[in-house]
Image (tube, rainbow, N blue to C red):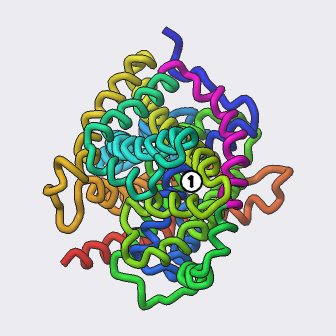
Amino acid sequence: MPGPKTVVFGTRLGFYLAAIGSAFGLGNLWRFPYVVAENGGGAFVLLYLALVFLLGMPIMIAELALGKISKGSLSPALSKLIGERYMVRDIREKSAVLPPLVKWFMRHLGTLSMMITVVVLAYYAVISGWVLHFFMQLVVSLFNPAHFEPGGALAVLLKNGWLQLLLTSVHLMTVAVIVAKDLEFGLEKWVGYVMPMFGVLLLVLAFHSLRLDTATEALRFLFYPDFSKLTLASLGQAIGHVFFTLSVGFGTMVTFGSYLREKVYIPMAGFRVSMMDSVISLWAGVMIFPLVIIGGQQFAGPELLFQTVPHLLEGLPWGLWFGVAFFLCLYLASLGASIGLFETVVANWREVRRVPRPRAASTIAILCFIISVGPALSTNVLSDVKIGERNLLQFFDSALINWCLPITALLISQAVIWTLKHELVEAEFVSEEQPSGRKIYRHWVFLLRFIVTPVVVAGLVLQLISLF
Ligand code: PFF
């Protein structure tokens, strides 16, 4: 059996495409608008943008550095950090021994993170199934335009749990086959084609939205910060969303870092991926909010994207064709992101236990499918099951992203900054071609040591208070 590590990114572009492919997904188009709508608009957007650069980007750099230095995914990387003296920074003079409690935490952090990744993958697959449904509905409507009725397509889907399970399983099988066959590193190329195409589509749709009467009001809602609209839970929700959209806290960026060749400058990679991801989210907001305002309070929650975009298409010449292209691109984006999540779990498992790829992939796919039953049936068979105000899908989304993810992202980042030998990390920042690297390194250390922990803890505590 070949060793677990069989891949490296052949080119810098290949790495960027895979990292952007993983960051860019349903988080930008599906989740961002509805979380912004729930949190009152402009002030939340501002908070989100500040947190991307204060928390998300530094943690992404930390994860990439951990992977690149250890040449392993999260679990093996943390084991190396515990066990190998060359990686551990001197905590006490001349000794590189970590206290037993810290070791215990680090040993289990990888497992915790993988559990979260599997559950996120499961409900992500349900929403990917929704995208697939809209794509297919629009393709059929090309031949029979009378078939397309924006509200109808969503209602049919939400009422039909079995259809959702079928679509979820199709999505999970596609992802599992791609990862089992080790195809994703060839497929990173299609991200290169899809991204620019999607960029152009979003531009066209957003410009169309900006011509609606509600555009000014929408822009004001999105960009004028009215801090009185923030709630106690807003900070925690913004933190969670930043980590989700940048794919940090899952170990994905550690795995990608481990596939990196020497030449990629990690701080710049972190900056570029964060920047692009934020621009796409804002653009999605510009496209969707004029329609949200037209719909009044009617459009809200996880269905927001699927309620608004079809209405946008109705008013557009060639709307059905745009719709097909939009949902195709969105599906490919969610496929890329799902592959990132799936590959992370497979890579961790293989590196720790050396299981064959196909076995790892099929086991994870089955596990995800079982977990997805709850969210897929949450709007129909299980619609009476509520946790607080939320149905099962909303509960999964909120518990994982607003609570679990901030905790794992925080712990991973603190493991890197407090235990990884700093000469090794500094070497990733400072080089002859990067004279300002030392300064960037100092800022990065400051953010991770003194900003990330208090902000994340404050977010979690405020969220906790908001529950009572
Ligand atoms: N960042 C993705 C999104 O915004 O949809 C979600 C995601 C993908 C998280 C891949 C983690 C990951 F490994």
Does the stretch in magenta take in 339? no
Identify the main secondary structure in magenta.
helix
**Few, some or many residues within 10 Å of mark 1 (<14, 14–19, 20+):** many
Task: Kindly identify the amino acid type of the residue bearing the numbered disc 1.
Answer: Met
- Report how many numbered discs are placed on residues in the image: 1
Q: Position of residue 349 (x, y in %)?
A: 40, 28
Q: Is residue 448 left or right of residue 373?
A: right
What residue do we see at 40% from left, 47% from top? Answer: 127
What residue do we see at 71% from left, 36% from top? Answer: 14
What residue do we see at 45% from left, 34% from top? Answer: 342
Vertical arrangement, residue 216 with respect to residue 95, above or below: below
What residue do we see at 58% from left, 28% from top? Answer: 184
Q: Nearer the viewer, residue 81 or 342?
A: 342
Residue 438 appears in the picture as rendered: yes
Residue 426 appears in the picture as rendered: no
Q: Nearer the viewer, residue 61 or 177?
A: 177
Q: Is mark 1 within 8 Å of ligand 1?
A: no
Q: Kindly indicate the quadrant of the structure image that contains residue 169.
A: top left
Residue lying at the far left in this picture: please name it: 384
Residue lying at the far right in this picture: please name it: 433
Q: Position of residue 171 (x, y in %)?
A: 43, 34
Residue lying at the far top in this picture: please name it: 1
Q: Secondary structure at mark 1?
A: helix
Q: Kindly indicate the quadrant of the structure image that contains residue 128.
A: top left
Q: Position of residue 37 (x, y in %)?
A: 44, 73
In magenta, the rendered stretch is 180-204
Vertical arrangement, residue 30 with respect to residue 300, above or below: above
Quadrant containing the C terminus is: bottom left
The residue that disc 1 covers is: 60
Q: Is residue 6 left or right of residue 261?
A: left
Q: Position of residue 116 (x, y in %)?
A: 34, 46
